Image (tube, rainbow, N blue to C red):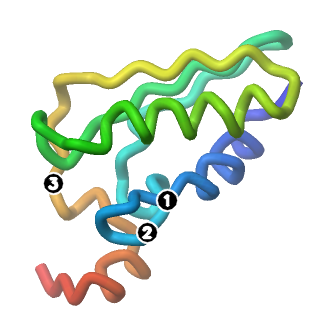
Amino acid sequence: MISQSQAMEILKGVIDPDVGINIVDLGLVESVATDPQAVRVALIMTTPACPQTSYLQDECARLLNATGATATVQVLDEPLWDPSRMSASAKETLGWNG
């Protein structure tokens, strides 16, 4: 079993190929729930038409499944992503001052 914090650390290994920043710092991880056998992740994309949706879902599942847990990764339509969800380091990397 992995904890929620361990799952979040693992998800930092999923890099959005369009911007080169991990999905946790981008604020794409809406929630993570764990139990002894499973990890459930809910993601939101920066745009509903994000071309990387399938890739990001697959990478999350691949990394979490490698721990021995069964991962389920869902993409939500809401809430909508906005730049305030990004970490300070992601904002700095992208030059976001807002």
Sequence-wise first label, 1 or 3: 1
How far from the left and from the top, in percent, is residue 10? 70, 48
3 and 2 marks in contact (CB < 8 Å): no
Q: Is residue 56 left or right of residue 38?
A: left
Residue shown at 73% from the left, 14% from the top: 70
Vertical relation: 90 (above or below) 44: below
* Residue receiving disc 1: 15
Sequence-wise first label, 2 or 1: 1
Sequence-wise first label, 3 or 2: 2
How far from the left and from the top, in percent, is residue 98? 12, 79
- Rendering quarter of residue 33: top right
What is the three-letter code of the residue carrying label 3? Asp
Residue shown at 70% from the left, 39% from the top: 63
* Residue receiving disc 3: 82
- Quadrant where the image shows the N terminus: top right
Vertical relation: 70 (above or below) 22: above
* Residue receiving disc 2: 21
2 and 1 marks in contact (CB < 8 Å): yes
In space, the residues marked 3 and 2 are separated at their CA atoms by 15 Å
- For label 1, the crowd category at 10 Å Cα-Cα, with few meaning under 14, some 14 to 19 and many 20 or more, is some
Nearest-to-viewer mark from 3 and 2: 2
Q: Is residue 86 left or right of residue 6?
A: left
- For label 3, the crowd category at 10 Å Cα-Cα, with few meaning under 14, some 14 to 19 and many 20 or more, is few
Depth check: 32 or 58 in front?
A: 58
In space, the residues marked 2 and 1 are separated at their CA atoms by 5 Å
What is the three-letter code of the residue carrying label 2? Ile
What is the three-letter code of the residue carrying label 1? Ile
